[in-house]
Image (cartoon, rainbow, N blue to C red):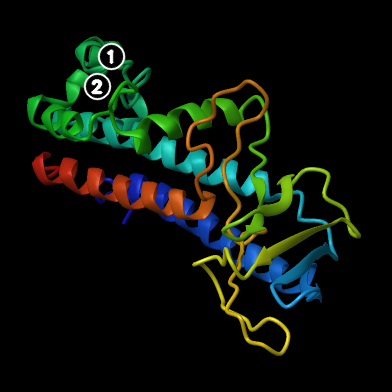
Amino acid sequence: MYDEPFFAVRLKLQRAGEHIDTLEREVAEYVARGVDLRTVETGEAWSVTWRMEILEAPPVHWPSIIGDAIHNLRASLDLLVTEAIAIKEGVDSATLEKVSFPVAKDVIKLQDTLAGSGALRVGNAVVIEIAKFQPFTLNGNELITAIHELDILDKHRALVPSAGTFRGASSESGFGSLRGIMPGDYATFGSHADAPSVQGIPPGVGDIGIPVSFTLHFPRTPKFMQPGDLALPFSGRSVIETLREVLTEYRRLVDAVEAVVPSRQ
């Protein structure tokens, strides 16, 4: 098993998937017990107000789960290059040092980055497959470059996602970062019959049944947030959905590379 080509790479991806599954499960469990969303008043016939109250503080270890998933995703790419070289040169991957998956500034710099990372040793066939996935920041594949940046960032600060909001077509309300949310905190949200939301569940308002919808974003889909002046990759995107998209892309990349690497003798 351990001698199978790219076994360690796929193991890293499997572990990343397990972290994502854990986060998704814990978010769902927390929403079920820790957040209360209720209608607090219907007011006039044309309006309704909801109140979202925090019953339990969000788990503090979620940023660690996100960081672990990101690290496993990034490490899988370095292992991919290392294993491809080991197979091509017939050496033990443990003997290879200073080899990494190339992430370039732009397509012009890709060749230099390939050389600097040691990745040129994989051979032309693998280089071509890697280049197809556009691992460069400017107009390249964000699913590769953003994970590279987030992995570096996670070494220096926790990746605390945003809590999200609940919203309608006319307005929204909620909380920013998951950090600092405490039991008893709440936000209110109103919607009007002349500007109903087109998302979410359409409950009736009072006895007249006006279909006003809302979408609960807290924290069912925690999102990457931009802390202060820092330009954070994936900012505003769903953490869980985005990481699953990255995982799928990386599996495609591994399959593409494996298809052009000769079998180990």
Q: Can residue 5 be seen here? A: no
The circle drawn on residue 150 is none
Q: Name the residue at 48% across, 38% down.
A: 234
Q: Label 2 sits on what residue type?
A: Ala
The image shows residue 122 at horizontal and vertical percentages of 17, 26
Q: Name the residue at 43% across, 32% down.
A: 146
* Callout 1: SS: helix
Q: Is residue 132 above or below residue 4?
A: above
Closer to the chain start, of discs 2 and 1, is 1
Disc 2 and disc 1 in contact, CB within 8 angstroms: yes
Q: How many marks?
A: 2
Question: Horizontally, is 197 left or right of 78 in the view?
Answer: right
Q: Can residue 44 be seen here? A: yes
The image shows residue 58 at horizontal and vertical percentages of 77, 56
Q: Residues within 10 Å of mark 1 (few under 14, many from 20)?
A: many
Q: Name the residue at 28% across, 25% down.
A: 139
Residue at numbered disc 1? 113
Label 2 or label 1, whichever lies nearer to me, is 1
The circle drawn on residue 119 is 2
**Quadrant position of the C terminus in the picture:** top left
